[in-house]
Image (cartoon, rainbow, N blue to C red):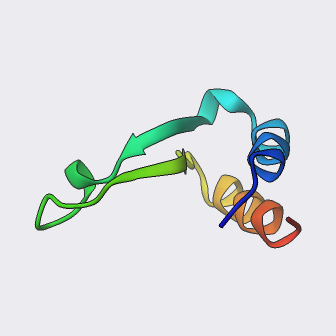
Amino acid sequence: MVTEEALLELDQRLGSGRMEVDAPLAPLTTFQIGGPADRLFHARTSDDLGESILAVRDL
């Protein structure tokens, strides 16, 4: 379980403009199932993806 404090820190590090809060996962899965994700990061480049991995690892 991720704390609200950790989520806020993640928002600050990655930019809330690229984060979707309480994002439904069902539209992204083959079987159209899945509840909301606390945060869904939209990486535009491979560098964005690497940055997000480092940010999450540091939490």
Q: Residue at x 76, y 64 (%)?
A: 56
The picture quadrant where one finds residue 17 is: top right
Q: Residue at x 14, y 67 (%)?
A: 30
The picture quadrant where one finds residue 8 is: top right
Residue 50: horizontal and vertical position, in percent?
Answer: 72, 65
Q: Nearer the viewer, residue 13 or 22?
A: 22
**Quarter of the image where the N terminus is located:** bottom right
Q: Nearer the viewer, residue 19 or 36?
A: 36
Residue 25: horizontal and vertical position, in percent?
Answer: 32, 53
Q: Residue at x 27, y 60 (%)?
A: 34
Q: How many marks?
A: 0
Q: Residue at x 57, y 49 (%)?
A: 43
Q: Nearer the viewer, residue 50 or 32?
A: 32
On screen, residue 51 versus residue 37, left or right, reads right
Residue that protrudes farthest toward the left in the picture: 31
Residue 3: horizontal and vertical position, in percent?
Answer: 75, 55
**Quarter of the image where the C terminus is located:** bottom right
Residue that protrudes farthest toward the bottom in the picture: 57
On screen, residue 40 versus residue 34, left or right, reads right
